[in-house]
Amino acid sequence: MKPSNVLFILSDEHQHNLMGCAGHPFIQTPNLDALAQRGTRFCNAYTPSPICVPARASLATGRYVHDIHCWDNAIAYDGAYPGWAQYLSESGLLTESIGKLHYKSESSPVGFRRQHHPVHILDGIGQVWGSVRNPLPRTMGRSPLYDKIGPGTSDYNRFDARVADTAVDWLTDHAGDAKPWVLFVGLVAPHFPLIVPQQYLDLYDPATIELPPLQPSTGYVRHPWVERQALHMDHDAAIGTDERRRLAIACYFGLVSFLDAQVGKVLSALGENGLDDSTTVIYSSDHGDNLGKRGMWNKCLMYRESTGVPMIISGPDIPAGKVSETPVSLVDIQNTILGQTGCSPEMLSGPGQSLAELANAPDLHEHLAFSEYHAVGSESAAYMLASADYKYHHYVGLPPELFDLRRDPDELNDVAGLPEYAAVLSLFEERLRNLVDPEAVDAAAKLDQDRLIEAFGGRDAALKTGTPAATPVPVE
C-alpha cells in the first residue's frame, strides 16, 4: 500500500454508541455518520483505561497502563517511553498536534514538531488528590463537576471551535506536501461541564429524555467496587433531581452534536484541499461516560458506557460501509498510524494491531480488548477483558462480574454467579492472569502513588493539591 497522510481526531468522553451510525435512534451526528459510511466502524472498541490521563498515555505509546506506570490523572505521559509521534519524527515525517493532549507538559519530549493550542495536566501536576487511595478517603464531599448544566458557550466550546478552525488552516497549508504527514486534532467535547450552545441543546428536548436504567433508588444493587466509588464522590446526588438529570443528558447529547459539527469542519477542509484519497482518517475518544446509568456519572468504571469508545477509520484501501465486530482498543492506534505512513516495520511495537489490517480481515470474535483502572475513587484495581461475546470484570479483593454480550449487550445482568457460565468465567480469569498479575500491579500502582503523595508533603497536603475539576484550556 502507498503511504498515506493520517488525520487522527480524538474527542473526550464520547460514549461509544452515541452516533447515528452506531444505531442510536435520534442523536444527530451527520459528519461522523458520513465518515463511517466511507470507511469501517469498529463496534467493539475500548479504552485501555476509563480516565483521561492514563488512557492518553497508553494511546501515545501503544502500551498498557501497567507497562508505563501512568496510573492516574497526576502521573502523565512525559515522553520517557517512546511512542508513535517520536517514531514518526525520527522517520522524518511532519507530525504536529492541535488541541488537547493531556500529557505532562508542552516541554515534554513527546515527538510533535509543534503543538498548537496545547492542553496538558494543570501545572504539570494534575489531580494529586486523586492519587490518595491507599487507603481511600471515605468521601471527598459534594461533587462540583455538575454545578453548571444548561445552555451557553463555555471556554471548552470556544476552544474546540478554535481547534477545528486551526486544523482547517493547517490542512490548507499542507495540502501540497510531498511526503506524508500526521496531524492529531484533540477536541474536548462532550466532556463536562455540560454547557452547550443553545442551537445544539435545541435538538434535544429534556422533557422527552428517558432516565437511564439500573437506578439504586428503584432497587438496583451496585457492585461493591462501584458503590465504594459512589460513596467517594456521589455525582448523582450533586445533580439532584430528575429534571436536572434529563437536562444533563440533553446537554451531553447537544455536546455530541456540537462535536460532530467541529469534526465536519475538519473533514470538509480535507475534501476541499483534495486530500480525501491520500489521507487515512481515524476518529475515536479517550473513554466514554456513564451518563447516569446505575446512578453513576463521569467515567472510571468497567461498564461499556465508560470503557467503550467510538472507533472509525476511513481512507485508502479501507473497506467502505463496513462494521467490524473485532474487539479493538486505543493501543491499536500506534501501529495503525505507523503502518499507514509507511514507517519501518521494526518500529511496530506493543500489543496493538493495525486497524487498517483488522478492517480488511474477517471479524475476530475471540480477539480481546483490555482495560484497567487504578485512579481516583478506587480502593483496589479493576480490570476488564472483552471479546465480541463476553465481557469480564476483575476487581482485586472483590467478586468478578461477567456479561453475556450476545444476550445482554447493555450489561444489565451479571452472570458471574450462574453455574452455566462457570467455565467462561474461569477461562477469562485465566486469560487475564496470562496478561497481567492483578494483585502485583495493584500493589505497584499504590506504591508509585504513595511516593507521589510523600513528594507533595504527605496525605493531608496531597488531598488539597491539584485541579479540583476539569483541566482548564487556554482562553483567547
Image (tube, grey):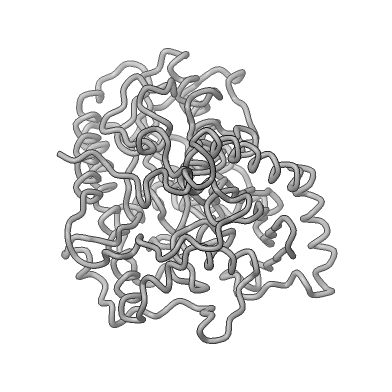
Q: Could you tell me residue 141's position as x and y percent?
A: 44, 64
Res. 356 visible in picture: no
Q: How many marks?
A: 0
**Residue 62, picture quadrant:** top right
Q: Nearer the viewer, residue 105 or 15?
A: 105
Q: Could you tell me residue 314's position as x and y percent?
A: 42, 42
Left or right position of 419 against 165 = right
Q: Is residue 344 above or below residue 182?
A: above
Left or right position of 425 against 258 = right
Q: Nearer the viewer, residue 88 or 358?
A: 88
Q: In which quadrant is the C terminus drawn?
A: top left
Q: Nearer the viewer, residue 187 or 94?
A: 187
Q: Could you tell me residue 212's position as x and y percent?
A: 45, 76
Which residue lies at the image location 26% right of the left edge and 72% below the top edge? 204
Which residue lies at the image location 64% right of the left edge and 34% below the top edge? 67
Which residue is situated farthest in the bottom direction here? 218
Left or right position of 193 against 343 = left
Res. 329 visible in picture: yes
Q: Nearer the viewer, residue 56 or 366?
A: 56
Q: Could you tell me residue 322's position as x and y percent?
A: 49, 52
Which residue lies at the image location 64% right of the left edge and 70% below the top edge? 223
